[in-house]
Image (spheres, coloured by chain):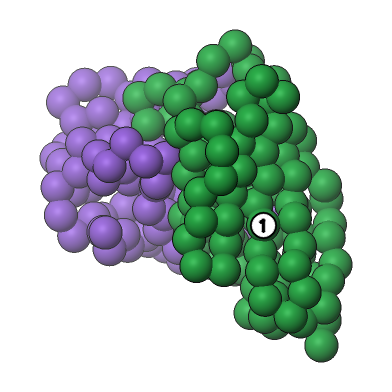
Chain colours: A green, B purple
Amino acid sequence: GQSLEQPSEVTAVEGAIVQINCTYQTSGFYGLSWYQQHDGGAPTFLSYNALDGLEETGRFSSFLSRSDSYGYLLLQELQMKDSASYFCALGTGFQKLVFGTGTRLLVSP
Amino acid sequence: SAVISQKPSRDICQRGTSLTIQCQVDSQVTMMFWYRQQPGQSLTLIATANQGSEATYESGFVIDKFPISRPNLTFSTLTVSNMSPEDSSIYLCSVDWGSNTGELFFGEGSRLTVL
C-alpha cells in the first residue's frame, strides 16, 4: 500500500514563506498532487509534480524527489486566507489518489 | 472545470438507518469517486463509480455497506447503510476531468452525523 506523512500543524506570519513537507512510502505512483481545504470547504487542487523538480504556480511551488520519497509545498508571501489544511496525494493509477495525513497551516498577522 | 452538486449538504441520522447521497455533475465525466473524511482527518477513497458496471471498492469498504449507483455520466449516488456513530463523516464526491495532472474536482461534501 501507500502511506504519506505530513506535519500536523505549521504556523507562520503574514508575508513569510512556509514549507510543508510530505514523505511517502509506495511501490509506484504517477505523480504527487497538493490540495488546499478550508474549514467546511471542498478540497481544491493546487499543484502537481509528475517529474522530479520544482513546479511553480504563482505564490505556490511544489517539489518532488522520487529518489528521496519526498516532496514539499512552498507558500510565499503568506496571506491570512492561506490558513487552511493542506494535503499531499499520490496518484496511484486510474486517476485514484491516496491522500496524506494533512497539515493545518495557521497564518497570524 | 466542473460544477459538482451534492445533496444533502448535511444530515443528522439515527443509528441503524440508511441515507443516500446524490452527486450531480454539470457535464459528462468518465471517472467519479467517493471519498470519506472523518472529523479532522484526511480523505480516504471509498470506491470508484463506474458508469454501466459495478463500482470498484477500496480495501476496507464493501458494497453491502456503501452501495453505489452510476446510472449515467453525470450522476452518482452513495448509500451509507445501517449507520452507526462511526459513520459520522463528510462524504465527498469527486470527478476527474481527464487531464492526467492529478487534479480532481470535489463537491462541497455531505456532512453526516449519526446519533
Task: Name the residue type under label 1.
Answer: Leu
Residue A65 coordinates in the image, percent (x, y): 64, 30
Residue B115 coordinates in the image, percent (x, y): 69, 54
Residue A51 coordinates in the image, percent (x, y): 48, 31
Question: Is B44 or A32 nearer to us in this picture?
Answer: A32
| Residue A24 in the image: above or below residue B9 | above
Residue B69 coordinates in the image, percent (x, y): 28, 35
Circle 1 residues within 10 Å: few <14, some 14–19, many ≥20 = some
Q: Residue at x 85, y 67 (%)?
A: A11
Question: Is B113 or A108 nearer to us in this picture?
Answer: A108
Q: Is residue A70 visible?
A: yes
On-image quarter of the N terminus of chain A: top right
Q: Disc 1: which chain? A: A
Query: Which residue extends farthest bottom?
Result: A109
Question: Is B109 or A99 nearer to us in this picture?
Answer: A99
Q: Is residue B114 visible?
A: no
Query: Which residue extends farthest front?
Result: A53
Q: Quadrant of residue B111?
A: bottom right
Question: Is B79 or A69 nearer to us in this picture?
Answer: A69
* SS for dot 1: strand
Q: Is residue A66 left or right of residue A19?
A: left
Q: Is residue A20 left or right of residue A38?
A: right
Q: Residue at x 32, y 62 (%)?
A: B5
Q: Residue at x 32, y 36 (%)?
A: B100
Q: Residue at x 69, y 75 (%)?
A: A78
Q: Label 1 belongs to which residue?
A: A74
Q: Is residue B3 left or right of residue A68?
A: left
On-image quarter of the C terminus of chain A: bottom right
